[in-house]
Amino acid sequence: MDTVEIALTVNRERVRRRVEPRKSLVDFIREDLELTGSHVGCEQGVCGACTVRVDGALARGCLTLAVQCDGATVETIEGVAASGEIADLQAAFAAANALQCGFCTPAMLLTAQELLRDNPTPSGAAIRTGLSGNYCRCTGYHAIIEAILATARRRREDGRG
Ligand code: FES
Ligand code: FES
């Protein structure tokens, strides 16, 4: 299979690789860059486990081809977590027991962060709607919603929401 050279920025680092044109972004991130926080579930855009940011917006890593990201800026859970941007959200998830197996958690955190950015005062119902594209098989969602509500409250108290 022929390969194509792509150059992009991943978690603030310039990356240049040759990839097969059919390779998905999430497979590229996991296999070629060995960043395994983005997960592969359904591979058809339903479960949300493969969520990453491409040029600042959430994207399904399973429905995006790596070659489509030539020249793009990609952020994975590893980079977002390392930046400290979601440290309070991560702490709230831990405090609320909002994760069990953890498979959905990286994508949940990225989605929750975008949700809070768009709506700093979400209701429980708004959070449920915002997370409707992210499946969790373990928690029943209640603790996840509590963690996001607690983060929103704390950010408002700290003047960050
Ligand atoms: Fe991409 Fe399920 S693996 S949405
Ligand atoms: Fe297991 Fe969400 S914690 S899938």
Image: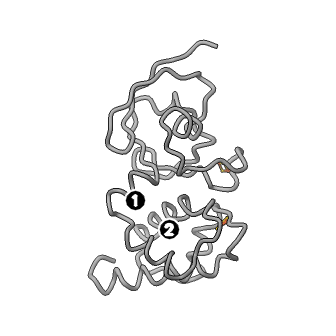
Helix or strand or loop: what does disc 2 sit on? helix
Residue at the extreme left of the image, as rendered: 159
Q: State which quadrant residue 54 falls in.
A: top left
Helix or strand or loop: what does disc 1 sit on? helix
Q: Position of residue 157 (x, y in %)?
A: 31, 87
Q: Position of residue 3 (x, y in %)?
A: 55, 16
Q: Position of residue 159 (x, y in %)?
A: 26, 81
Q: Residues within 10 Å of mark 1 (few under 14, many from 20)?
A: some
Quadrant including the C terminus: bottom left
Q: Residue at x 62, y 75 (%)?
A: 128
Which residue in the structure is indicated by mark 2? 112
Q: Is residue 8 left or right of residue 129?
A: left
Q: Residue at x 32, y 38 (%)?
A: 13
The kind of residue tagged 1 is Ala
Separation of residues labelled 1 and 2 (CA atoms): 13 Å
The colour scheme used to paint the residues is: one colour
Q: Residue at x 52, y 27 (%)?
A: 67
**Of callouts 1 and 2, which one flags the residue occurring earlier in the amino acid sequence?**
1
Q: Is residue 75 left or right of residue 28?
A: left
Q: Is residue 82 above or below residue 8?
A: below
Q: State which quadrant residue 82 falls in.
A: bottom left
The residue closer to the viewer here, 4 or 91, is 91
Which residue in the structure is indicated by mark 1? 81
Residue at the extreme top of the image, as rendered: 2
The kind of residue tagged 2 is Ala
The residue closer to the viewer here, 122 or 74, is 74
Q: Is residue 159 above or below residue 4?
A: below
Q: Is residue 90 above or below residue 70?
A: below
Q: Is residue 105 left or right of residue 10?
A: right
Number of numbered discs on residues:
2
